[in-house]
Image (cartoon, helix red, strand yellow):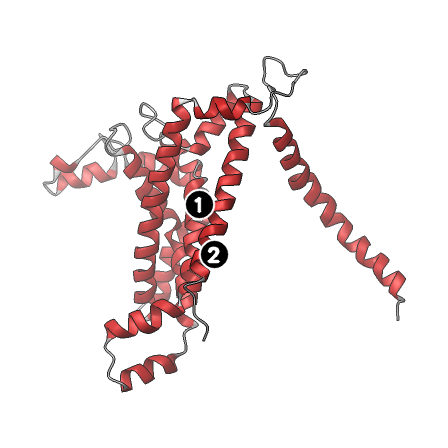
């Protein structure tokens, strides 16, 4: 049997590689990004970054493109989160019942989540093609040609088209989490409620909804963070166009960094991290108060 001293040495030895990798790929880059946010480092002066205090943050809030990206990110997050939560819950309830081929339906709904967002964006760019895209071709073939649109170049539909693609691509994980929550509710509660004469409406609001609140909390936080950090979907479909109508926070940071404004883009990234962390913790605290123990 190993002594406590030897056991401690072995513990450190096993943990050290993981800690070094974590430091190399997470701690050091984040600390570097934090420091970079307060400098004027850019491609114009790559070797002489100087501390400039809060200048980058002031410049951010004075930028009209920054304001547009925040507005579009909020719109995207609210729309996709709302649809995923509501539609995901309804689909989970449907798939939780004894229906034929439910395992096949679960697989079909979940399968898009395994694909890279950029790959999905390229596929949907073909679907949304105004002249020969399958969506418009189908609408014209069934006599609904008046509904055919230039989905990605029309200011009215560009953001909605991206939201629709994102919901299709990622609602699967939302459904799976809701299914897990629904299946964790003891069936005895439903049986007792049925004996007491409770209808499906009362069973849903008095049993299902309160007892699946942990799943709702997890899904809401994941959808919130996923919507806020959206990038691949927008980059692959519109790259922020047309006329910045789909410019989101992720593409704003990417374009700032691509133009050589390293300190400026680091400040935008730091601000994003702080705001999302605060919103997530506040939301988590509020939702936790709604959860019930059973």
Q: Which mark is residue 10?
A: none
Which residue, given by chain and number where applicable, does mark 1 sit on?
226
| Image quadrant in which you'd find residue 126 | top left
Which secondary structure lies at badge 2? helix
Q: Residue at x 75, y 48 (%)?
A: 17
Q: Nearer the viewer, residue 17 or 122?
A: 17
Q: Nearer the viewer, residue 294 or 133?
A: 294
Which residue, given by chain and number where applicable, does mark 2 sit on?
285
Query: x and y percent of residue 64 in the render?
Result: 38, 23
Please identify the quadrant where the N terminus is shown: bottom right
Judge whether residue 257 can be spotted in this image: no
Residue 276 lies left or right of residue 45; in this view the side is left
Which secondary structure lies at badge 1? helix
Query: How many numbered circles are shown?
Result: 2
Farthest left residue in view: 143
For residue 189, above or below residue 63:
below
Judge whether residue 50 can be spotted in this image: yes
Q: Nearer the viewer, residue 74 or 182?
A: 74
- Mark 1 Cα-neighbour bin, 10 Å: few <14, some 14–19, many ≥20: some
| Image quadrant in which you'd find residue 125 | top left
Query: x and y percent of residue 261 in the render?
Result: 54, 20
For residue 61, above or below residue 105:
above
């Amino acid at each position: 049997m190993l002594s406590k001293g030897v056991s401690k040495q072995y513990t450190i030895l096993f943990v050290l590689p993981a800690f070094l990798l974590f430091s190399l790929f997470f701690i050091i880059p984040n600390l570097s990004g934090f420091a970079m946010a307060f400098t004027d480092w850019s491609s114009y002066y790559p070797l002489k970054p100087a501390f400039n205090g809060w200048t980058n943050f002031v410049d951010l809030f004075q930028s009209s493109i920054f304001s547009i990206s925040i507005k579009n990110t909020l719109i995207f997050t609210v729309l996709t989160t709302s649809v995923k939560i509501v539609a995901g819950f309804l689909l989970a309830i449907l798939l939780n019942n004894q229906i034929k081929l439910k395992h096949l339906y679960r697989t079909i709904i979940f399968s898009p989540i395994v694909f890279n967002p950029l790959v999905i964006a390229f596929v949907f760019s073909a679907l949304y093609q105004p002249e020969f895209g399958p969506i418009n071709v189908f609408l014209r073939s069934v006599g609904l040609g008046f509904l055919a649109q230039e989905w990605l170049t029309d200011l009215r539909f560009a953001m909605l088209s991206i939201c629709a693609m994102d919901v299709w691509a990622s609602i699967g994980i939302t459904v799976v989490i809701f299914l897990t929550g629904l299946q964790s509710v003891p069936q005895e509660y439903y049986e007792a409620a049925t004996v007491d004469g409770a209808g499906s409406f009362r069973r849903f609001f008095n049993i299902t909804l309160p007892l699946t609140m942990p799943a709702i909390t997890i899904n809401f936080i994941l959808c919130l963070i996923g919507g806020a950090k959206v990038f691949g979907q927008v980059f692959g479909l519109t790259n922020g166009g047309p006329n910045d109508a789909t410019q989101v926070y992720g593409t704003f940071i990417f374009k700032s960094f691509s133009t050589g404004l390293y300190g400026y883009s680091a400040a935008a990234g730091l601000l994003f991290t702080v705001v999302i962390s605060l919103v997530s913790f506040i939301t988590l605290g509020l939702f936790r108060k709604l959860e019930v123990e059973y």
